[in-house]
Image (spheres, coloured by chain):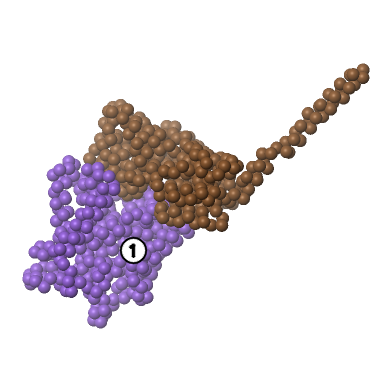
Chain colours: A purple, B brown
Amino acid sequence: MAAFKGLAIGAKDKAMNAIGWPNWRRLNQEGIVFAIAILLFAAAALSLPGFLTADNLVAIVRSVSVLGILALGMAVVIIGRGIDLSAVAIMAMSVAWYLQLLNTGTSDGLAFAYVLAGVLAIGLLNGFLVAYADVPAIFVTLATGSFVFGYVRSQLITQDAVPVPQGHWVELLGGVRFLDIPVEVFVFAGLAFLVFLFLRYTKWGRFIYFAGDNPVAARNIGIPVRPMLVLRYALSAVVALIAGLLTAASLHSINTRVVNSTLLYDIVLVAVIGGIGLSGGRGGVRNVLVGAALIGILLNAMTIIDIPLLYQNLIKAAILLGAIIVDGIINPRDEQTAQQGDI
Amino acid sequence: MRLLRTLMAAATALAVTAFAAPSFAADDPGPAAYAKALNGKRVMLVPLAMGFDLAQGWAHYLKKEVEAWGGTFETRDPNWVVDAGAQAITDAIASDTRPDVLIIHAPDLNSYSKLMKKAQAAGTYVILVDNPANFPADAFVGSDWDKLGQLEAEAAIKGCGENSSKKIGLVQGDQANSSSLYQYAGIMKVLEKHPDFQVVAKPDSNWDATTSRNVTTTMLQQHPDICSIIDFWDGDATGASAAIRDAKLDGKVFLVTTGGGEKAADCDKLNDGTYGAVVMTDLARQSGDMNAIIKFLLQSGQPAGTSHTYIYTLEKATTKADLKPDSCWDLKALQAEAAAK
C-alpha cells in the first residue's frame, strides 16, 4: 500500500493514507494522472465550446462507464497480484450466447441460468488453475479467453453480431434514464461504491491487499489465500457479464468483434494509469476512477476537436508514457519500493 | 416426270437432312469444354472474417455454383486478423491442393499485395472482392466506393432537404481501409458541388459500434441541429443510431449508411426508421459476377495475372419509400437452407 511505500511520511499522513486520502506531499502516479486530468478538463472547458455542459459531462462519464466497470473487476484481480485477460471475451461471448439462446426460442430464465452458470464456470476455472494448479494468471486467462471466444463463436452462435430480441428487457434497460442520465452511469457508480465497501471495510477485502502484497506471508498468518483467489476471478467474470449486458442494452446488439479490439488493453490501462501497481497490493477504486476520468476527458476533447483516430492513439499513448516517466523520476524504484514479482 | 421425281427425292433428302440437324446438338462443344475446364477446380474464399453477413452470403452463392460444376469450394476464416489472413493465403499457395482461384477480401490497400503476386506466380487466379487493393488482380468484383460515397452524400442531401440546417456529420471507418478512404473522397466530391452543405465533424469509429455511439453522442451535443449523419458501415451504424435515439433526435437526424443488403441489418432498420437511407450492395448479383468471372478465367487458358478486369456492382440508395419485398436477402433463410441439406 502507498502508506508503506515511503519511510519519510509523517504519522498523520500515514493515518490519512490508511483511510484512502491521497498523499499530496508526495506526488505519486495517481496524483500525476489526476493533475493531468484536471488540467485537461480546465483547458477543454475554457477553449472548447460545448464541453462544459451538463449533457457533455454525462456523455463523458457514460463513454467510460462500461470501460470503468470492467476496470473495477480488473482492479480487484490486480490488487490480489493477478490479471484477468479473459474479461473482454467473457463480456462479449456470454451476452452473445445469451441473445442467441433468446433468438432461437429458449425461455429467458433458462437462457440466463445457462449463461450465468457458464460465466461462473469460467471464472472458477480461472481461479482454480491460478490458485491450485499454480499456473501464472497471465497464461491461464489468456488461454481461457481464447477458449471462450473460440468455443462460443464456433459452436454456439452463427454470426459476429447478435441482435437483442425486440421488446426484451435488455433493450428496455438501454432506454432507462434517471434525470436524463443513462442507466450505465448509475450501474458504474453503484458498482464502484460496492467494490469500495468490499475492499475497504470487509475482512476479505482487506485480506486481498495482504495476499497481493505478500502471498506467502498472508498464507502463513492463516488467510485463506487460495479460496479468495478463486473468488476474485469469479467476481471478475460476473462483472464482465454485467458490462456486456449494458453494452447490448445500449446498442441493441452485441458484436463479438470487440474481443479483437484494444478494449482489453484499455481496461488494464485504466487500472494501471490510475496507479494500481501490476505487482499487487496497492491501489483501490479511487485509482480506477482517476484513470477512467483521464481517458474519458481525453477522448471526449479529442473528438470535439475532431482529431483523426490515428493521432488520437498517438496522443493517448504519449500522455500515458509521460505520466509513467514522470512517476519514474519522482518515485524512483529501489530495493525498498520494488517487490518480488514486479512486472 | 423423271425430273420431277429427282427433284422430289432431292427435296426429301434435303428435308431428312434438315430434320436430322438437331442431332448435331449432341456434339455441341460447349458443355464438354466447360466440364473439362472446370471440373475438379478449386476455389477458395478468404474474407476478412466468416462471421458477418457479406462473407456468409458470398460463400453461400459461390458454394452452390462451384459445387454444381464439379469444383471444390473452401473458405478460410481469419476472424478480422490480418496476420491470420496472410497465413491462410500462404498455406493455400504452398499446399498440395493449391486453389485455382483465390478470392480475397483485402483488409487494406497493401497488406496482401506480395502474397497475391506469389499466388499468381504459382498459377492461381486472384479475384479481389469488395475492398480494392494496390495490386493488379485478375479481377476486382465489388463496389466502386467513390461512387458509393457519392450516392450516400446525395441521399443525405435529399434527406436533409432545402430548409434544413444543411449540417452533415460523418462517422468514418478508419484511415487505412480503402473502402473508408474512397467513400470519404466520394462524399466530398458531391458536397463540393453543394457548397451550402457543410461537414461539421468527421470522427472515426474504427468500425466499432460503441465508439460510433460515443463519437456520435459528442457530435450531436456540439451540433444539435445536424440534419444528417453518414456512418460508413451498417456494422457500426447501430452505435450512431443509438446515439441519435438517446439524444431524442429520432426522425430529426437522417442516418445514411451502407451495407450488404441483409434483411435484419438493413431492410428491417429502414422499415422501422432507424436508417433513413442505405446504399445496399446487391449481394446475389455481386456473387453472380464472381461466379461468371471464375468460369471465364478457368476457361480462358490465359496465365494468371494476364488481364485485369473491374466489375463494379450496381449500387443504389434505398429508402423506406422504395423498399420492396426483394430489396434485401435474408441470411436466416440462407442458413436454414444450408442446414436443411
- The quadrant in which residue A150 appears is bottom left
Residue A177 in picture, x, y percent from top left: 26, 49
If the image is split into quadrants, where does the N terminus of chain B sit? top right
Residue A249 in picture, x, y percent from top left: 34, 51
Q: Is residue A181 above or below residue A189?
A: above
Left or right of B83 on screen, residue A320: left
Left or right of B152 on screen, residue B55: right
Q: Is residue A175 above or below residue A140?
A: above
Residue drawn at 26 percent across, 57 percent down: A68
Where disc 1 sits, the SS reads: loop
Residue A212 in picture, x, y percent from top left: 25, 72
- The single residue placed furthest to the right in the displayed view is B1
Which residue was labeled with disc 1?
A: A85
On the question of residue A200 being in view, the answer is yes
Residue B240 in picture, x, y percent from top left: 32, 43
- The quadrant in which residue B300 appears is top right
Q: Nearer the viewer, residue B110 or B104?
A: B110
Q: Nearer the viewer, residue A180 or A4?
A: A4
- The quadrant in which residue B131 appears is top left
Residue drawn at 16 percent across, 46 percent down: A44
Residue drawn at 38 percent across, 42 percent down: B178
Amino acid type, callout 1 = Leu
Q: Nearer the viewer, residue A246 or B157?
A: B157
On the question of residue A205 being in view, the answer is no
